[in-house]
Image (cartoon, rainbow, N blue to C red):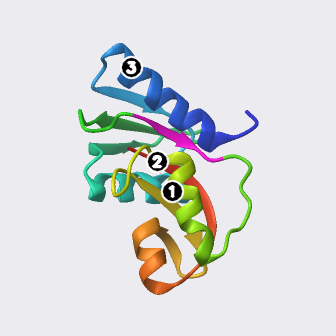
Amino acid sequence: MADTLSNIFNVMNISRRVGHTSCVVSPSNKLVINLLKMMKDSGYLDNFELINDARGGFIKVEINESMNKCKAIRPRLPIKASEITKYEKRFLPALNFGIIILSTNKGLMTNEEAKKLNMGGVPLVYVY
């Protein structure tokens, strides 16, 4: 597996497109769990459950109807606080519709939180 984030969000996208309300993604790590928590707080996921096994663990994700698309951003290059609006225009379909999750010095945060704190970071995922 070359990119675990792309794989996980690809499985979620395909499951949503074919009409499933839940899917199982793997492997589970702290980054993926924190991304899913942020998506749940924003209202794009109903719930998720960790399933531990001897290898890497699984995550059962319950997808909400409000999620249209979720995708990992590649290449992951650091951006300045002034460039966040450029990335919003590139990846999100409309103003204030969807979120971009950034990895910053102060942890993971959405594009709106990063703009308020005037912080840059590395964009990981966009969801709308």
Point out the residue furthest to the bottom here.
Answer: 117
Q: Can residue 29 be seen by looking at this rendering?
A: no
Which mark's residue is nearer the viewer, 1 or 3? Answer: 1
Is 35 left, or right, of 74 in this rendering?
left
* Residue 1 coordinates in the image, percent (x, y): 73, 33
The magenta stretch is 69-73
Q: Closer to the N terminus: mark 1 or mark 3?
A: 3
Q: Residue at x 62, y 38 (%)?
A: 6
Label 2 crowd (10 A; few <14 / some 14-19 / many >=20): some
| Label 1 element class | helix
Whether residue 16 is visible to the viewer of this picture, yes or no, is yes
In this view, 87 is above or below 5: below
Q: Amino acid at mark 2?
A: Leu
What is the quadrant of the C terminus in the image?
A: top left
Look at label 3 and name its amino acid.
Arg
Indicate whether residue 127 is drawn in magenta: no
Q: Quadrant of residue 120?
A: bottom right
Q: Amino acid at mark 1?
A: Glu
Residue 23: image location, x then y, percent: 38, 27
Residue 88 numbered tag:
1
The residue lying at 31 percent from left, 28 percent from top is 22
Residue 92 — which label? Answer: 2
